[in-house]
Image (spheres, rainbow, N blue to C red):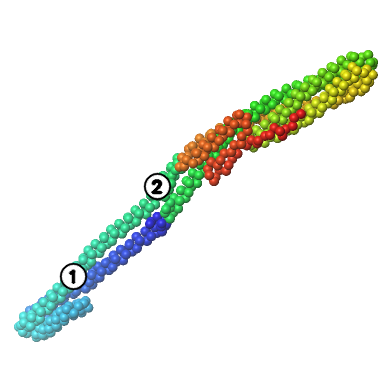
Amino acid sequence: MLKNIRIGTKLFGSFLIVLALLAGLGVFALAKLAAVNATTLVVTGDSMPSVRAILFANAHMNRIRSLEFKAVIAEASEVAAVDKEATAKIADLERVDAEYAKLISDPEERAQFEAYKADVDAFIAEHAKIMALALQNKDAEARALIEGESLKHYSAMRAACGKLSDKAIGDGNAAAAAAAATYESARGWIIGMIAACSALALVMAFAITRGITGPVRVAVDAANRLAEGDLTIRLDASGKDEIGQLMRAMDGMVSKLSLVVTEVNGGAEALAGASEEVSATAQSLSQAASEQAAGVEETSASMEQMTASISQNTENAKVTDGMATKASSEASEGGEAVKATVVAMKQIAQKIGIIDDIAYQTNLLALNAAIEAARAGEHGKGFAVVAAEVRKLAERSQVAAEEIANVASSSVELAEKAGRLLDAIVPNIRKTSDLVQEITAASEEQSSGVGQINAAIVQLSQTTQQNASSSEELAATAEEMSSQAEQLQQTMAFFKLAGVGAVAHVRAANTTIAAARKSAARGKPTPVRVKSVVPGRLSAAVVSDGADVDENDFGRF
């Protein structure tokens, strides 16, 4: 229940309860103090002044009584002074009686005081008679009154004073006892209330402290486990107070972090597999580029030989033309020269066939380079451009070789026809000379075309070498990426995850990548896709995508 109350409300409520209890205790203590004060006022303001007044009254009565005896035995000249002093004491007695009358608080005491006052008045009346007799020197009569009626009233007056004194002392004792009882009662109640307030405060403090320190201790333990990479923790976030909100926030943070770490871990696994695949592809591409460079060098050497042959063919055609114009006697020699020309043309046709095969292989190599560049992804865009240029050059070589083949075929046919004509009809030598001139012109054109092919092959060789160098750089980059992926995997291994789904997905991805790698090693481009490692988070990533190739798309020459 306390978990659903905010901490501020709990603290404020507990302090408010303690303050209310303290206020109640203070009010109760003040009430008891007021009661003790009232009883104390009874003692100090009533009982003690009453006793004091009675004591003074007794003292004055005793003095008046002694002055009466003194007046009886004194000289006549001293009686007046004694009478004067006695009159003053009577005035003091009346003053004390008046003060006492003000302190009377109940009817019983009032009745006792009235009886005492009657005795006092009777005593004063007898005192006046005694003093009058003393002034007349009637000492015997005065003594008789002193020992008679005056003594009776004096005794009654002293008895009344004793009752009044006992009454005042009793009231004082009763007030003191009431004060003591009030003190004892208040003391017990105050001690009990202090104990109850302290117990309640301790219970509330314990409950509130436990409600705060317990969840905080759990949060600290969770934070320590989180610092150690343990993402399997789960926190109780059922409370609605600030601690509950903290628990919910930490639980959400752990869940989100666990999901992120799972995604990153899966991505690291996929990246490691993809980097290995890229490395294998780059190595294969580098090897193919090296082989292509060697083939281009061989093609270049063959083209140089073919250029020399075409130049020689041109010179032979010119010589044949000169010889044909000299004389028919040289027709036989011309026939032999034509035969030699036919042989040379056949050799040219064979060389052109070689060029045709080389151009075809170059075209296939360019296609393979484009495929491998596509499989390399972003890193293979440059190679794709180079492969496209190589393919264009191969197509141009194909066209040029086809043209040369056509020219060579025509030359062979013309040479054979010239031979037949020379063998059959000598007068046709002039016509043969014209044909030889045409052969010369065709050979010059063929020489020019072969020169262009040679230049293209040189450029293709440079491009192929650059492609091989870039492939090696791509392989090195792929190896570095693989190393970084492994380092990332080692770093992510620090976290401990609760689920095993991510691991299963990553293992499946690695299996797919391994299969693709084996397929690539066999020289078969295989489209490979890695499924999402974490459902709903990591989208499908294409590691290598090789397109299906139809060899019929390429023409032969």
Q: Residue at x 14, y 83 (%)?
A: 118
Return the residue at label 2.
217
Q: Amino acid at mark 2?
A: Arg
Q: Give the number of the mark in front: 1 or 2.
A: 2
- Whether residue 78 sits left or right of residue 492 in the image: it is left
Against 85, residue 20 (above or below) is above
Q: Residue 373 placed where, x, y %?
A: 66, 34
Query: Distance of mark 1 from mark 2, alpha carbons?
Result: 62 Å
**Residue 477 appearing in the image:** no
**Residue 175 appearing in the image:** yes
Quarter the C terminus occupies = top right
Q: Residue 259, labelled with which disc?
A: none
Quarter the N terminus occupies = bottom left
Along the line of sight, the residue nearer the viewer: 75 or 183 = 183
Return the residue at label 1.
174
Mark 1 or mark 2: which comes first in sequence?
Answer: 1
Q: Residue 171 placed where, x, y %?
A: 18, 72
Against 187, residue 346 (above or below) is above
* Disc 1 crowd, CA 10 A, few/some/many (<14, 14-19, 20+): some
- Whether residue 47 sits left or right of residue 435 in the image: it is left
Q: Residue at x 18, y 79 (%)?
A: 107
- Whether residue 6 sits left or right of residue 411 in the image: it is left
Q: Residue at x 34, y 60 (%)?
A: 18
- Whether residue 120 sits left or right of residue 28 in the image: it is left
Q: Residue 390 placed where, x, y %?
A: 72, 31
Q: Amino acid at mark 1?
A: Ala
* Disc 2 crowd, CA 10 A, few/some/many (<14, 14-19, 20+): few
- Element assignment for label 2: helix
Along the line of sight, the residue nearer the viewer: 195 or 330 = 330
